[in-house]
Amino acid sequence: MLTQSSKNQNRRHVHERIRKKILGTAERPRLNVYRSLNHIYVQLIDDLKGETLISAHSAEGGEKGQRRTGGNVASAKTVGKTIAERAKAKGITKVVFDRGGYIYHGRVKALADAAREAGLQF
């Protein structure tokens, strides 16, 4: 009997393949993206130490009842700008982009473009 694989299983397989080639360091950390239905999350990771240096997500800020959905391109742009500003404040300007197995389109592309415009170099 054949088993069906879900979109998320396929994405994880692609992400594992990508991660074999990408490594984040303290000088050039890995910009990792996770996209859920309602929000988008991004981290700067030093893989040599195994620690997250900076993070940002669309669920930040505001009262619980007043938060808007983060599952759109506008909030992805805001998160991209936020992560770039926090990285520049810590003295990080160059990163390695890890799209997390997602297609480089829509929210992922908007986040990357906003981070580039705010001063990060991929």
Image (cartoon, rainbow, N blue to C red):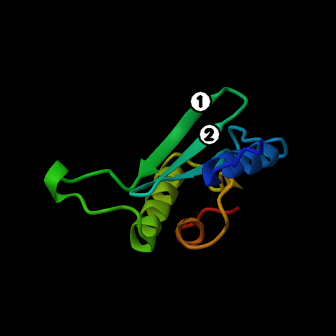
Q: Mark 1 falls on what kind of element?
A: strand
Q: Is residue 108 left or right of residue 24?
A: left
Relative image position of residue 67 (x, y in whole percent):
23, 58
From the viewer's side, name the closer residue of 75 and 50: 75
Position of the C terminus, as image quadrant, is bottom right
The image's mark for residue 34 is: none
Identity of the residue furthest to the front in this view: 1
Residue at mark 1 to residue at mark 2: CA–CA distance? 6 Å
At label 2, the amino acid type is: Ile
Relative image position of residue 36 (x, y in whole percent):
47, 53
Residue shown at 66% from the left, 68% from the top: 104
At label 1, the amino acid type is: Glu
Q: Is residue 95 visible?
A: no
Residue shown at 59% from the left, 30% from the top: 51
Q: Which residue is mark 2?
A: 45
Q: Which residue is mark 1?
A: 51
Q: Is residue 19 left or right of residue 83?
A: right
Residue shown at 77% from the left, 41% from the top: 1
From the viewer's side, name the closer residue of 33 and 12: 12
